[in-house]
Amino acid sequence: MTAVEPTTPLSLESVFAPVRSQTAFEETVDRLGTAIKLGLLPAGERLPAERELCQRLGIARSTLRQALIALGQSGYLHAVRGRGGGTFVVETPPRADRPDALTLATWQEVCDERLALEVGVTVLAVERATPEQLAVLDEIVLGLDDCIDDYPAYRQADIRLHVGLAESTGSARLVAAMTTCQGAMSDLIHHIAHPPQVLAHSNAQHARLLAAVRAQDVGHAVRIMTEHLQGTEHILAGLLPR
């Protein structure tokens, strides 16, 4: 009688399906974090080996390692060295403040509103930002690199960067809208962990965004801003408590 090879449950087929998004790092965090929260990857489960995961997800090993580090820093995974080692789901996932029902029902709408606003701001900033304004934003990005391990300080500087980009348009209404939008996002991301790996990745996007704005390359600037914001949405989807 021929032995029957074990098959992968359909639910895990979706977890380990190829990642095709431009935001591969954040989407991998989203995919694995959600699978852990839903119990598709149960407590104590060992993840497939890195080589296999890279092949199944269709991502580079460096991208996978960034995502695994972020999930480890968030308290969802831990690494075990030596024989029998690997990357395992923690026995007790972290407990964060659970958002209220309205927040859980509307968080994606907040992200949609932010996407519409910030992409529009980016288009105008490419046209209107002065070298002096961009120099100030460059300094903020440099400062963000220095507070990767201090989330409250990072978030304050991050808000200054995005509001500063709105200020470069010369529109008081857009500045007011950006301030309101950033407040709504702060309320959302209060409920998730803030691993340094994610913050460093986000700030690298800030630097590339400013370079595109300075080059007056509106298409490239919009693509970077869109990836940046969709990346945040993936992180929220993966780490927001349900």
Image (cartoon, rainbow, N blue to C red):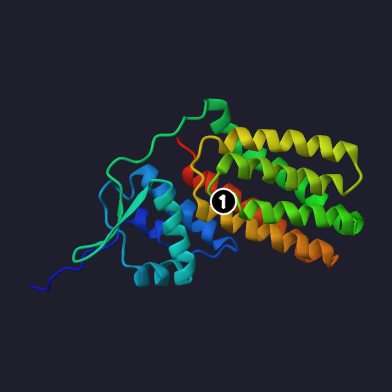
Q: Is residue 77 above or below residue 53?
A: above
Q: Residue at x 41, y 72 (%)?
A: 55
Count every numbered label the image shows and give the total: 1
Residue placed at 67% from the left, 33% from the top? 184
Choose between 38 and 210: the one closer to the eye.
Answer: 210
| Residue 223 horizontal/vertical position (percent) | 72, 61
What's the amino acid at mark 1? Ile
Q: Residue furthest left?
A: 1
Q: Residue at x 59, y 53 (%)?
A: 231
Determine whether, in the image, residue 242 is placed left or right of residue 103. Answer: left
Query: Which quadrant of the rendered structure holds the N terminus?
Result: bottom left
Q: Is residue 104 above or below residue 54?
A: above
When the figure is inspected, residue 51 is found, relative to residue 35, above or below; the finding is below
Q: Quadrant of residue 111?
A: top right
Task: Write down the residue under mark 1.
Answer: 148
Identify the residue at image location x=54%, y=44%: 236
- In the displayed structure, 120 sits above or below 52; it is above
Q: Quadrant of the C terminus?
A: top left
Q: Position of residue 202 (x, y in %)?
A: 61, 55
Does any portion of residue 1 appear in the rendered image?
A: yes
Dot 1 surroundings within 10 Å: few (below 14), some, or many (20 or more)? many
- Can residue 58 be seen? no
Name which quarter of the figure residue 7 lies in: bottom left
Q: Is residue 228 left or right of residue 42?
A: right
- Across and down, in percent, residue 230 comes to 63, 52
Horizontal and vertical percent position of residue 68: 41, 58
Does residue 221 appear to the left or right of 228 in the view shown?
right
Label 1 element class: loop
